[in-house]
Amino acid sequence: GADLAAAGLANAGGRGAREIAARLLAKVAASRASPDAAALETLRLFLAISAPLSGAVDALQAFADTRRLAVAPALDAFAERVSAISRAGLDPSVIAYEASFGRRLDYYTGLVFEFRGADGAVLAGGGRYDRLLTLLGATEPTPGVGFSLWLDRVATLFAELPEPMA
């Protein structure tokens, strides 16, 4: 913090100048590394997985079997999440699973999601973010889940619904 203050800059997210510089240098080093061809192919195959949520567990299991990956605990946890979604009254066959989907904010630590209208416009998006408050300076990790609504889009969607019949 003192290094930043000496330069006339405000501390950002509770990180000091040394931590910010170390993270930047690590990112530069990682960008110069040559990826392992087999690992890169595995990643490409994983990111190509796209299925209705009702078929995602089978698709992920097939991927794991093909690549000989031991992911049973993670896949069991994912299957339980799909089951919980179904028990909550949502139809997993109309929910899309996209392995390549992610939120662009690095504080997300778990499940992330978006709700889209029929026209493809994002109506809501969010996820689990256990690191957010720590990044903002909290001294203890605090779990969290949240989302943002695009109220103008939601309002437009409801304005376009037909009037209920009496």
Image (cartoon, rainbow, N blue to C red):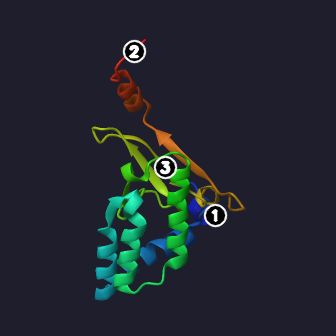
> Toward the viewer: 7 or 119?
119
Inter-mark Cα distance, 3 to 2: 34 Å
- 77 w.r.t. 137: above or below: below
Give the structural element (helix, strand or loop) at label 3.
Answer: strand
The amino acid type of the residue labelled 3 equals Gly
**Pair 3/2: label in front:** 2
Q: Which residue is mark 2?
A: 165
The amino acid type found where label 2 is placed reads: Met
Q: Is the C-beta separation of discs 2 and 1 under 8 Å?
A: no
Residue at image location 29% in from the left, 68% down from the top: 48
Q: Which residue is mark 3?
A: 126
- As measured in the structure, the alpha-carbon distance from the residue carrying label 2 to the one carrying label 1 is 66 Å
Q: Position of residue 150 (x, y in %)?
A: 42, 36
Judging by the rendered image, the residue that carries numbered circle 1 is 2
Say which residue appears at 43% left-offset and 67% top-offset: 57
Q: State the CA–CA distance, disc 1 to disc 3.
A: 34 Å
Of label 3 and label 2, which has the lower sequence position?
3
Q: Earlier in the sequence, mark 2 or mark 1?
A: 1
Which sits in the foreground, 64 or 113? 64
Q: Label 2, secondary structure: give it.
A: loop
Ranked by sequence position, the earlier of labels 1 and 3 is: 1
The reply, left or right, for residue 144 in relation to residue 26 is right
